[in-house]
Image (cartoon, grey):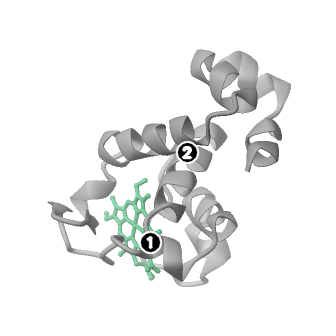
Amino acid sequence: MIARACALTAASVAAFALSATLACGQDDAALVTQGKRLFTEQGCYGCHAIGKTGTPIANDLTRVGSKYPESYLRGWLREPQAQKPGAHMLKIQMSELDARALAAYLASLK
Ligand code: HEC
């Protein structure tokens, strides 16, 4: 878990003040918390619901963490078409760090 967070490049660490804490901080929970915030900030809730929050237009993500591993979720967020050709979700622009945080959050939903 910690090794994954530490795999961030020096460039991305320099780019995001917060990532300095996340990149090699021992706190995986911080990544999950950030992902939870991004779910709202990135507008994911406009199409997806988690529990009672959000809009159930697309797949309900309440238990998405038991459906896919974190690596798949991260790949999905970076490039939906690469994970599933013909995917009906648009590619949302976000930093690698944001994708990691969102994937960590989604993977925690079991
Ligand atoms: C404009 C609507 C829309 C927005 C905004 C959106 N999604 Fe999606 N998402 C979809 C649709 C539609 C699918 C189903 C795609 C398919 O299977 O072809 C999907 C699928 C997914 C899946 C796979 C679910 C499964 O059970 O297979 C995940 C994970 C996901 N979205 C996460 C996110 C996250 C995180 C965000 C915010 C960064 C987001 N989505 C924003 C429409 C949206």
Residue 70 sits above or below residue 24 on the image: below
In terms of image quarters, where does ligand 1 lie? bottom left
Residue marked by disc 2: 101
Q: Residue at x 47, y 52 (%)?
A: 92
Q: Residue at x 26, y 56 (%)?
A: 45
Q: Residue at x 53, y 35 (%)?
A: 30
Q: Which class describes the residues within 10 Å of circle 1: few (<14), some (14-19), or many (20+)?
A: few
Q: Which residue is outermost to the front?
A: 26
* Label placed on residue 110: 1
Give the position of the C terminus as an image quadrant: bottom left
Whether disc 2's CB lies below 8 Å from ligand 1 is answered no
x%, y% of residue 63? 40, 75
**Image quadrant assignment for residue 20:** top right
Look at the numbered disc 2 and give the secondary structure of its residue: helix
Q: Is residue 94 visible?
A: no
* Label placed on residue 13: none
x%, y% of residue 6? 80, 37
28 sits left or right of 26 in the view: left
Tell me which label, 2 or 1, sits earlier in the chain: 2
* Residue type for callout 1: Lys
Front residue (pair 35, 9): 35
x%, y% of residue 76? 58, 66
* Residue type for callout 2: Ala
